[in-house]
Image: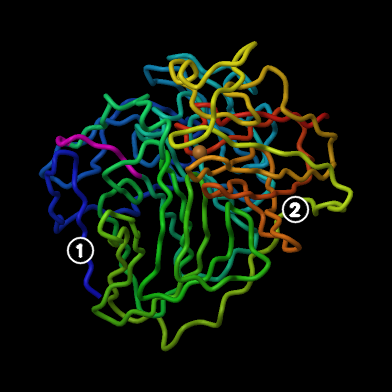
Amino acid sequence: MAFTRRRVLQGGAAIALAAGFGNAAGFSAAQAASPILRAGEGLARLAPGDYPETRVWSYGDRVPGPVIRVGQGERLTRRFVNDLPQPSTVHWHGVRIDNAMDGVPGVTQEAVPVGGTFDYDFTLPDAGTYWYHPHNRTWEQLARGLYGPLIVEEADPPDVDRDEVLILDDWRLTEDAQIHEDSFGAMHDWSHAGRIGNWITVNGKGESRLPAKRFERFRLRLINAANARIFYLSLEGMKAWTVALDGQPLDAPQPVERLSLGPAQRADLIVDITAGEGEEAFLTSHEQTRDGEERFAITGFPVTGVARDQSLADPQPLPANPVPALGDLSSARREGLQMEGGAMGRMQGAMMGGGFMAMRDLAGAGKVWALNGRADMPDTPWITLTRGETVRIAMKNDTAWPHAMHLHGHHFRQMVGADIGPLRDTLLVGQGESAEIAFVADNPGDWLFHCHMVEHSAGGMMTWLRVDA
Ligand SMILES: [Cu+2]
């Protein structure tokens, strides 16, 4: 296997493969134990050493922010300290959380002002791979580096040699490796695929390497923290199974060679290194280009030594989380969600504030998408659900773009005909496609439902529902 990494910064300056790039796995447990989660301005070495460090916004002075590890059923407390030049909040993505702790400004809390603090305090009902990020001006704050992994550990975790978080990001950098600020808010991004970058990092490094042994077993926790990029991934030199999606265990491990990971989605993999000594296994990204497909390694696993004589037995499923089972689907309440707008779409206009606005006027107001004909966050909930009821939502993506639809506070299942899919909190819905989801509305409060291509949600793809107490 010959892999080359050809990442090109804007302006055509090629970045050479650096020989001694940093250790991607340098997370500190001591830092994770700190009760303070501080967001502030700082520097990160995203690009090789012949480039300057990148001015970022980060949690705990690092990109990604500290790995927070908590046992299932335990409480997490963090005092968020906002040393950013903007108000911010922390959203704990995928956690079936107490509504008041969900971190949505204007819905569950006021944005924390510059210099202010907010005490987050909640229980983690489900084991799995989650992450945290701002929910204010997410299209800017996430792109500047504000994100980190939240790992909720099973009481009885699977038997693996190594448990590693790989948090993927997609940065838009200038020729001197600084965040491209002029394009924040660019309507072209908002109306097309979102802010797609030119520099990919795993755990904040342009080159990520995890030394491995032959037949070693890893749990890889993949998290997509990009604003808008869908990663198309493959695994080479290893045998792999998906054991959880968006934190929630699959009923049975699924063998996997390729997977897609939309913005905010996670996948827990169990992988056995099958590459031989002296070889290298890879997590590889596949990117569509004008000339076809380009593939490049985003994490290498150089193999030295042997962990055991042969692969371990196939993995067992992870223990299920206490997510309520769906009620009777034939009598379940049915709702619809129409997704419209964007470039090359048919949307003529949408409701905004008290009246209808034509597309041109909407664009002038920064809104180019609509959910059920509304381009702004409605004052009243899109739907109000009775606590404990099962609801089915039929989504129709009447746009020319894929969307990563995220429901707060709950996990849902996709329904495909008679098949009921795995639990998820974020679902990719392809251009022109329909998708139906079902969930039990068991978590009282006001919950967002929005696209996680964060330029799309800022541009109109955000609504909310209420679950009565
Ligand atoms: Cu979208």
Q: Is residue 60 visible?
A: no
Pointer 2 local density, CA inside 10 Å: few below 14, some 14–19, many at least 20:
few
**Residue that carries the numbered disc 2 in the rendered image:** 322
**Is label 2 in a helix, a strand or a loop?**
loop
Residue 307 x %, y % = 39, 80
- Amino acid type, mark 2: Pro
Residue depicted at 40% across the width and 66% down the height: 234
Q: Quadrant of the C terminus?
A: top right
Left or right of 373 on screen, residue 455: left
Left or right of 316 on screen, residue 241: left
Is the residue under label 1 in contact with that under label 2 (CB below 8 Å)? no
- Amino acid type, mark 1: Thr
**Residue 279 to residue 42: above or below:** below
**Is label 1 in a helix, a strand or a loop?**
loop
Q: Does the segment drawn in magenta span residue 46? A: no
Pointer 1 local density, CA inside 10 Å: few below 14, some 14–19, many at least 20:
few
Residue depicted at 43% across the width and 16% down the height: 364
Residue at mark 2 to residue at mark 1: CA–CA distance: 44 Å
**Residue 121 to residue 266: above or below:** above
**Residue that carries the numbered disc 1 in the rendered image:** 4
Residue depicted at 15% across the width and 35% down the height: 176
Q: Quadrant of the N terminus?
A: bottom left
Residue 467 x %, y % = 78, 32
Relative to the observer, which residue lies in front, 339 or 389?
A: 339
Residue depicted at 63% across the width and 53% down the height: 127
Q: Is residue 270 visible?
A: yes
The residue segment tinted magenta is 170-176
Q: Main secondary structure of the magenta part?
A: loop
**Residue 413 to residue 375: above or below:** below
Residue 398 x %, y % = 57, 40
Q: Earlier in the sequence, mark 2 or mark 1?
A: 1
Residue 334 x %, y % = 80, 42
